[in-house]
Amino acid sequence: MPATSPASAHQERRRRRTNRFVALTAGVVAVGALAAAALPGSASAGEEHKGGYGRYQDVQLLSFNDLHGNLEPPAGSSGRVTETQADGTTKTIDAGGVEYLATHLRQARKGEKYSITAAGGDMVGASPLISGLFHDEPTIEALNKLDLDVTSVGNHEFDEGAKELARLQNGGCHPKDGCYADEKFKGADFPYLAANVLDEKTKRPILEPYWVWKKNGVKVGFIGVTLEGTPDIVSAEGVKGLSFKDEVETINKYAKVLQKQGVKSIVALLHEGGFPASTSYNYDCDSPGAGDGISGPIVDIAKNVTPQVDALVTGHTHNAYVCSIADPAGKPRMVTSAASFGRLYTDTTLTYDRKTGDIARTAVKSANRVVTRDVPKAPDMTELISKWNTLAAPIGNKPIGYISGDIGNTGSESPLGDLIADAQLAHGKQLDPETDLALMNPGGIRAPLTYAAKAGEGDGVVTYAEGFTVQPFANTVNLQDFTGAQVIQVLKEQVSGPNAGAPKVLQVSSGLTYTLDLTKSGADRVVTDSIRLNGSAIDPAATYRVATNSFLAGGGDGFPTLGQGTNDVVGSDDLTALEQYLTANSSASNPIAPPKADRITIVK
């Protein structure tokens, strides 16, 4: 049976929360509300009477998403958020790190008798060395200490397959690497929900599909799903034996199940998201005007999820938004996302009607709050980070290269994307001197390389830990043969087919150049006549040797043509390729300069 919260255990956890030290600090807030309407009836929210409880009870829902094992403050742009000021200008704020996230969450819970903490998936996977080196056990330990109540799975929860996900949920030592600490890994204290992820043989969810929070007669149900397209963005081995069902159909199905159980207040935890019109975390998503609001998959999903669901906590796109999107009945419903990497959390107030058992939607309010670094660090998180850093230090502190400035990973073509593609081309030429070019998926580049020293290693030094944070997937570098026509088709798949709505611009190695005309539509956005390799036009009939990572070589990220290559050769993992390239091409006296990112000409 799907899990419900055992009353005694849950109340004990809440008692522990209220007894913990909480630092007093003011957070930066962006507020979105469905309405400022007064509650119906005569009782105020949370009012208690001698004979029992008032009709309305405010329930605090704290949520975040896409942590990706970022226990330490993320570096560079990955560790900042943008805030719009009253005069229309913007400023950036350093944010993130579980030492600060813990303090902010504990502060937010102070004085709240009814508080739930939930997450929207991708808590693990694509993690920095401190977590990824240990198969994300450190992150699960941190989430336990954060008193996370429940989370949906995301696509990255499947990076190491369903069996490893089950181990993170249930505990036990890693089957290959064993135990890392003196005691056996205990697993997650909170349930992972995977309502739309089925075992192909049993046709049943691999984990619980829903979970119910209960306190003093208040019941709130949570349904957890990941995006149906997970198999397209995870290695085939990670999703072997699994099927991923439609998000809307699944949520609507289990909303009916919960309703039959008498649970009428329902929140969907959905690892799929959207693209707000502004990158500022405090953008007013509901402001009128052409081009305003939010676009992307979450819009159609939200418009079709049953009105029985009262709010949607989303993720996946790493964007920040607090939006109201009309449900199928035409009534506004809150849809939120807290960016990524623990830089924000969302504070939502759900007003529970004890008479109906439902949420009074007109009273729902929500705010994205910045996890600023100007608050005291949570001592228990500092201790956890220190413990795992000590274990990782012999590997992580090793210098692997030198850079003369920050090498960023943002933009259609990024300096770091060029560097990684060049590293893979160099590795490919070691395997086969006839290798012509390399292609790298942008989603596989998880962080920038920053010039400033992070842990005392010195300015400009790139450590193995920093390289691991950039490329944590352990994909191999694969060589394949393609015709020139196939190479052209791969470039067109960046902006067509599954990638038409949200282009995935591959990072290209030195020598490959072309024009991407964003004023056109579909595959025509890649200007075929502009494609050159070392100055010469691509010959559709010729054969080209192409280096990619194993994820792309399997047709991942919406590039089916890359799954059709021949004469495969498998090299080292991609991090090794980057390490070898940095070591061979840089020194303390002659560091690598950030590439110019001028191989793709963008027309807007």
Image (cartoon, helix red, strand yellow):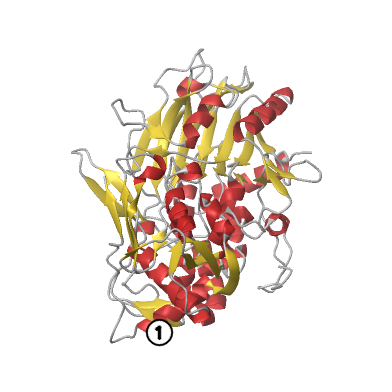
Lateral position of residue 449 relative to residue 330, left or right: left
Q: Quadrant of the C terminus?
A: top left
Write the residue at 51% across / 71% down: 574
Rendered view: 587 above or below 110: below
Q: Nearer the viewer, residue 256 or 244?
A: 244
The quarter of the picture where residue 183 lies is bottom right
Residue identified by numbered label 1: 584
The residue type indicated by label 1 comes to Ala
Counting from the top left corner in percent of width and height, residue 233 is at 56, 52
Rate crowding at label 1 as few (under 14), some (14 to 19) or many (20 or more) other CA atoms within 10 Å: few
Q: Secondary structure at mark 1?
A: helix
Write the residue at 43% across / 68% down: 437
Counting from the top left corner in percent of width and height, residue 415 is at 33, 64
Rendered view: 262 above or below 569: above
Lateral position of residue 396 relative to residue 322, left or right: right
Residue 341 appears anywhere in the view:
no
Lateral position of residue 536 relative to residue 126, left or right: left
Counting from the top left corner in percent of width and height, residue 586 is at 34, 83
Residue 55 appears anywhere in the view:
yes
Q: Quadrant of the N terminus?
A: top right
Write the residue at 58% across / 57% down: 563
